[in-house]
Image: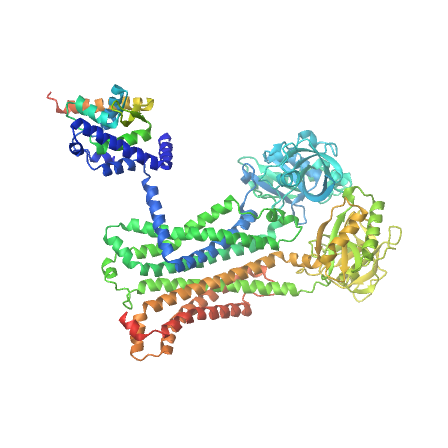
Amino acid sequence: MVAFQAMKTDIPSGTLYMLVLKTLVRLGSMHGYGIALYIQQTTGDVLQVEEGTLYPALQRMLIKGWVRAEWRTTENKRRARYYTLTPAGRKQLAAEVRDFERAMTAVRQVIEPA
Amino acid sequence: MTAFWRKLNGWWRRDAIDAELQEEIRTHLEMKAADLGGPSPARHGFGNPALILEDARSVWGWPGLEALWHDVRYGTRMLLKAPGFTAVAVLSLAIGIGANTAIFSLVDKVLIRKLPVPEPDRLVVVSANRGQGVATTSNFPDFVDYRDKNEVFDGLVAYTQRAMTLSEGGQAERIQGLIVSGNYFTALRLRPALGRGFLPEEDKTASTHPVVVIGYGLWQRRFGGDPGIVGKSVSLNARPFTVVGVAPSAFNGTVAGGAPDVYVPIMMMMQMTTSPIDLLFGPRSRTLSGWLQVLGRLKPGVSREQAAAAMTTLGGQIARAYPNADGSPRVEPTFLIEDGSRGHTNLLRDLRFPLQMLMATVGLILLIACANVANLLLARAGARQKEIAIRLATGAGRMRLIRQLLSESVLLSMLGGAAGLALAVSISGLMVSFTPPNNNAFSSLTLDNRLDVRVLGFTLAISMVTGILFGLAPALIASRPDLVSALRDEATVFGKKVRHMNLRNLLVVGQVAVSVIVLVGAGLCVRSLRNLNAIDAGFDPSKVLVMSVDVSLSGYNRERGLQFYSDLLERVQRLPGVEAVSLAIQIALGDGFGARMRAEGYVPKPGEDLSADFNQIGPDYFRVMKIPLLEGREFGQSDTSTTLPVAVINQTAARRFWPGQSPLGRRVIVGRPPDDESRVVVGVVKDSKYRRLTEEVRPAVFIPFFQRYRGDMTLHVRTTGDPATMLAAVRREVQALDASLPLYNTRTLEEQKTSSLYTSRLAATLLTIFGLLALVLAAVGLYGVMAYTVSRRTHEIGIRMALGAQGSDVRRLVMVEGTAIMTIGLLLGLGGALAGTRLVESFLYGVRPNDPIAFAGAALLLAAVTLLANYLPARRASRTDPLMAIRQ
């Protein structure tokens, strides 16, 4: 996953797909800028999504069939590409969340005081 | 998988994806700018938009494929930059690959391809030795017992080939039929293209079920692929047959080389022949020689040896159960079970050896071509050393570079392969033009000389392999990271590139040697063919037209048939331009059949061979053939069934039975009891060749047609002018008598003689062509190496000339080196040929495999051509301007 090497520390490695998928569950459908903004605001500016990783990731998700894209007009009369979750994407999200939680539990067992 | 398709789909609309991404990123920027209050903060933390676009786009890419595409594009540019090199390389490869493709397409059909039936490897040819050598045929009642009582086969089928007349829409045509046992399609597990195979009830009673399965080819050719053909009626030998099915398209029967137009159930055999029914199906036929070829499908787990043993046991029981008519025991057969995955291949046996020889030859030619291109590539690698060094220095990996160089050579070989295919088509056409006309054994080869998928696959495969074969060594050498010396441009330092030069010289030595071998082979075959052509056939084949008719298949009885032939002889005799006309059942040099013959009262020694050549002929036959009559008379129209039975014998028969005496008035016994007959000798003719030109003449006996009628006869017409121009006139005479009779075997005797030498002519012509191609390739190779050497040594030559060497000295210097290469190659080649040509000894006629003329001829031709190829660069070297050369 070449794209993830460029992520610095902003987003925990391997979680970008999960974050984007979850965002789309919450928002229904949204354009790239909206997704980045939502993640940033929801986490109180803790997590910064870099555009240089967001767009390759979105393309990859399109290829894998997790999301669909269509051009629509925003409230400010701009044409933007809106992404919507597909059933395959929903399944993927469930799997990623499960894996993530298992990993977090494991990590917590190591770092939390006994 | 779906992700793969989405990505593949994206490749077609990659421009649209690009545009969408660009717009998306621009919108993103604008929205961010609007939120933050200006374009410049928006850029902050956004990164480079072009880079984002690049990264996002690359998600859709195919990294391996794109690198390959890049290699191919780069390779194409490099090849276009050196058009001379590319042309010579592609031409060399085209010759090598084209020759291989053409020969392979024939080898595949004759020697490799298995029958298009399920599990062909379990099919076996069943033959038996009944005390007179291995016979591939069986009679019908024995076959039925073998079929029903054996425990080793999943199915046993029998068949025989038979020509017949198809009349359809008022047009009569002679077609090839396969008369098959009723289980033929089911036992072979063939699924007809249309309709069905034969039913069990169609295999029970003689002549009650006139049904036919037609071949795919006939269905297409004659019935336009009519989908409603099943259920229609066609006329075979003037009797209606119902079409019940169409054979599968890839299926050409089970006799290799044949292509049956129709498959007729064995129970309809009576409609296909004039033999009486009891000789075909009756119990008496058990003691006669067979007429059916037998093919079996082994049960799983049964070996050929087990099957042979089981069949020998069964055959013994059957032989004991049915003794000879006089009560004496029948010979118990010993069975032989052989590979039948390609059906019965005995008719193609003559082709096997020449094809193997040709395949080996074209393999050698491909090696020469590869050596040529490898040499050219090595020369180019020298010229491209700087380019390669720069690429290595700037960080290109050696593997990446080798891949680049290899893709260039594969590109070359693909171009060569494409050009080779075109060449193969013309070589195939040439081979087909040698095929004997109207020859049953080769009909599927002539009908089907297209290059099919298997052949294309073969061409693609050898193109790939040759590309890697000739490209690998040069690529390895060229990419050797010897950066420093290459960049310092030391290429012209004399003696530095010794290693490359050795490999290059070695390649040329190999080329010369291999082409000597091919040339010697060609020389031997040409000399052998000359000997064959010089054989005195004993008759004069020029200006004789032959043409066969079979009136028995059109329902003529004996009386009507005799009348027909009598009328025909009279009408043709009256034609202007006809010198003499006669009839015969057998055409000379046509692999005819023999008969047993002995003098009356002659007691044969035990095991003595009494077989003789046999022909049944009309009046004037010997005059038409120009076979000299030594004693007595020819047959006349007066020799009929009511007059004394007579015969004419040849010199050899006369000498054998009546040495030193005249056989006139003596009696001979012709045939085998109980069908033998006694005849009075009324004439002796000079020996001639009967079945083939290379035969040892045996005793021969001729009996008169008007005395012993047959329905299938061949008209022999001696003309005063070119016989081919008389064809239409003679045909008109036949049709004036009966327009519905199909004519076949229409040819001149000269053509018959030529086509009887088919395999020898094929081998001699192709080997000559291939030998010359090999010679040209080797000459080009030597020229290339010497020209390269000269160009590399211009500097050195300049110095030599400046120091006083004359042009002739320089010329000698270059010639000596080239001649050394040629001589080594020539000697190696002659040695190789001496060892190799022993293998072809059996194929040669009147030439020994170490024939000095063939060897000397090949050596001289090669020396002359290579010296010329060597002289051109030598002359150029001798014209070097020393000043220019030293300044260089």
Residue A69 occupies quadrant: top left
- Above or below residue B410? Residue B662 is below
Q: Position of residue B495 (x, y in %)?
A: 29, 68
Quadrant holding the N terminus of chain B:
top left
- The answer to whether residue B474 is visible is yes
Q: Is residue B779 left or right of residue B225?
A: left
Q: Is residue B476 left or right of residue B851?
A: left
Task: Tell me which residue sits at (39%, 51%) in the image.
Answer: B410
Quadrant holding the C terminus of chain B:
bottom left
Q: Position of residue B106 (x, y in %)?
A: 55, 50
Q: How many marks?
A: 0
Q: Seen from this angle, which residue lies furthest right?
A: B642
Q: Position of residue B722 (x, y in %)?
A: 72, 61
| Residue placed most toward the observer, B214 or B85 | B85
Colour mapping used in the image: rainbow
- The answer to whether residue B331 is visible is no
Task: Tell me which residue sits at (44%, 48%) in the image.
Answer: B461
Q: Is residue B823 left or right of residue B16?
A: right
Task: Tell me which residue sits at (60%, 38%) in the image.
Answer: B296
Q: Position of residue A76 (x, y in %)?
A: 24, 24
Q: Is residue B475 left or right of residue A23?
A: right
Q: Seen from this angle, which residue lies furthest front?
A: A77
